Image (spheres, rainbow, N blue to C red):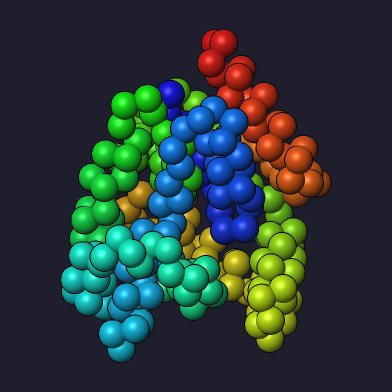
């Protein structure tokens, strides 16, 4: 069984995807980490994520980079949103994601184009979202817990900028697949969001 979980930044899709993977005993891939790895590799090399050539050459990163705590930083997130708009970068990472999805037994993948591009044949698709204000508050709280000095207004502005960039890019933009179930987590805690997600997947399995 392949489960595709898409949605904007800080919507809760990663938490939900991980919970679904544990519930169904499936491997999980946060595809955003691939783009964060490319972005952080460019930054650490002193390059510009907006330079497509530099971003493409960074796609050969070592898999060990995927466990680097630096990938969870805001800088990595911004860089990921930028490099993900480059066609050559998306092409370079495409098969890597598809191979993971099509492994024996299936998998859970979360990102922004899983249900539309990476695994349109997924058995269950969810589009997880929440209002920009709620998502910004979640990210702000998360960053504060790590000790980073940020303001809510800055985080909200970054969320809106990333939404616009991800939804407006010409290649594989962020959008809900036609056959994806919408899950708005704005008013849900983690337990309720996960329970709702499992229910939606079960509905699709029975259908």
| Image side of residue 140 versus residue 72, left or right | right
Q: Which of the two residues, 45 or 112, is positioned nearer the viewer here?
A: 45
Specify the quadrant that holds the N terminus: top left
Residue lying farthest to the top in this orientation: 206
Height in image: 149 above or below 58? below
Percent position of residue 196, x then y: 71, 31
Q: Residue at x 59, y 31 (%)?
A: 23
Specify the quadrant that holds the C terminus: top right
Percent position of residue 131, x then y: 71, 54
Height in image: 81 above or below 119? below
Percent position of residue 150, x then y: 68, 83
| Image side of residue 34 versus residue 94, left or right | right
Percent position of residue 98, x then y: 29, 40
Q: Residue at x 68, y 37 (%)?
A: 194
Q: Residue at x 69, y 68 (%)?
A: 142
Height in image: 102 above or below 63? above
Res. 184 in view: yes
**Quarter of image, res 145:** bottom right
Q: Residue at x 53, y 16 (%)?
A: 205
Height in image: 80 above or below 118? below
Res. 47 in view: no
| Image side of residue 174 versus residue 12, left or right | left
Number of numbered discs overlaid on the protein picture? 0
């Amino acid at each position: 069984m392949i489960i595709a979980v898409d949605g904007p930044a800080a919507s809760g899709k990663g938490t939900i995807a991980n919970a679904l993977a544990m519930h169904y005993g499936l491997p999980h891939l946060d595809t955003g980490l691939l783009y964060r790895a490319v972005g952080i590799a460019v930054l650490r090399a002193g390059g510009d994520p907006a330079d497509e050539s530099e971003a493409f050459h960074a796609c050969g990163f070592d898999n060990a980079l995927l466990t680097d705590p630096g990938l969870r930083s805001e800088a990595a997130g911004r860089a990921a949103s930028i490099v993900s708009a480059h066609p050559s970068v998306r092409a370079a990472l495409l098969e890597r994601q598809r191979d993971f999805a099509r492994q024996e037994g299936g998998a859970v993948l979360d990102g922004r184009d899983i249900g539309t591009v990476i695994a349109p044949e997924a058995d269950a698709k969810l589009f997880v979202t929440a209002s920009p204000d709620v998502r910004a508050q979640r990210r702000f709280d998360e960053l504060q817990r790590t000790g980073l000095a940020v303001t809510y207004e800055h985080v909200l502005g970054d969320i809106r900028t990333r939404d616009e960039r991800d939804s407006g890019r010409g290649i594989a933009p962020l959008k809900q697949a036609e056959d994806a179930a919408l899950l708005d987590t704005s008013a849900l805690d983690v337990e309720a969001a996960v329970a709702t997600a499992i229910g939606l997947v079960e509905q699709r399995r029975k259908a």
